Amino acid sequence: MVWPSRCHTPTTMTAEGKDAQRVIIAVDGPAASGKSTTAREVARRLRFLHLESGAFYRAITFALLADGVPEATWEGLRPEELDRFRIRGARGEHNGVQISVGDQTVDQELRTQEVNDHVSHVARIPAVRTWLLQRLRDLAGREDVVSDGRDIGTVVFPDADVKVFLVADPEVRARRRLAERDIHQPDRDTLLQEIGRLLERDRIDSEREVAPLKKAVDAVKVDTTSLTFDEQVDAILELARGRLAAGRA
Ligand code: DC
């Protein structure tokens, strides 16, 4: 299914301040629930911009680590101090956003074990969230967007047209995460260790005070435990089609 690109002028605002002309699809869920890959494909099919918010938390983590800022001082960071890392997002290939830190474009650098191990800490720092919130909204501009993260439907785009909350069994999530690192038949210890890491990240993401991971009341929960990738994508496209058709009626 492909929707034609939408015309954004003249702009009409909803009561909540969202540009009524554009469409926002919010995909939230815990680590390794399949949010980003699914959101990317949904965006590709619809020709929407894919805005992966987790990548920005990773970029900030990468910048802090690369710059050697002591972890003990992260909590006290002020939003203005993050400017010096020159973290930018620009429209990249395949409807995505290419992130750069200073003069370096970053991609694989955001997926290292070191970044994985520190990103939940960075994501619960209020200054980081304040700094990023406006940037995510600015990046989305007035485009049609599929955005994924933990607080997209609750905080970043509370007026999103379609809200999806993806969940999956922890073992399935751990296997997916390991497969990303080319570990396809993990031994029991490796699997248990990965499940432990994921559950710890879920705990930190859900229990933090600022913008915790939680399902928006109006989000639709989709359990991807026994869905194939194509089925996940279709489930979201189906929901989007239904919601948007209802909205236009
Ligand atoms: O989806 P991910 O694993 O790339 O997310 C990286 C971290 O960023 C994870 O600890 C949760 C956090 N995050 C967040 O707090 N809010 C978002 N909207 C997206 C990610």
Image (tube, rainbow, N blue to C red):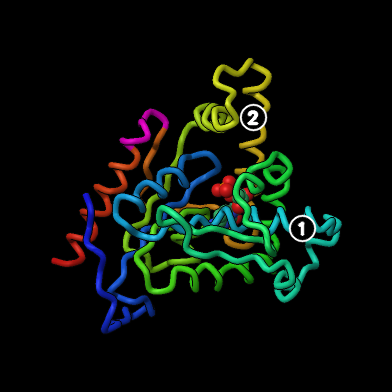
Q: Callout 2: few (<14), some (14-19), or many (20+) C-alpha neighbours within 10 Å? A: many
Residue behind mark 1: 64
The question of residue 162 being in magenta is answered with: no
Q: Position of residue 13 (x, y in %)?
A: 32, 81
Quadrant of res 210: bottom right
Q: Position of residue 61 (x, y in %)?
A: 71, 55
Residue positioned most to the front: 103
For numbered disc 2, what is the local secondary structure?
A: helix
Vertical position of residue 207 compared to residue 234: above or below: below
Q: Earlier in the sequence, mark 1 or mark 2?
A: 1
Residue positioned most to the left: 249
Q: On the picture, is 236 further left or further right than 29?
A: left
Magenta residues span 225-231
Given the image, on which type of amino acid does mark 1 rest? Answer: Leu
Quadrant of res 47: bottom left
Measured in 3D between alpha carbons, the distance from the residue under mark 1 to the one under mark 2, in whole angstroms, is 24 Å
Q: Position of residue 81 (x, y in %)?
A: 76, 72
Q: Residue at x 17, y 67 (%)?
A: 248
Quadrant placement of the C terminus: bottom left
Which label lies toward us, 1 or 2? 1
Residue behind mark 2: 194
Proximity of marks 1 and 2: CB atoms separated by less than 8 Å = no
Q: Position of residue 125 (x, y in %)?
A: 70, 62
Q: On the picture, is 51 further left or further right than 122?
A: left
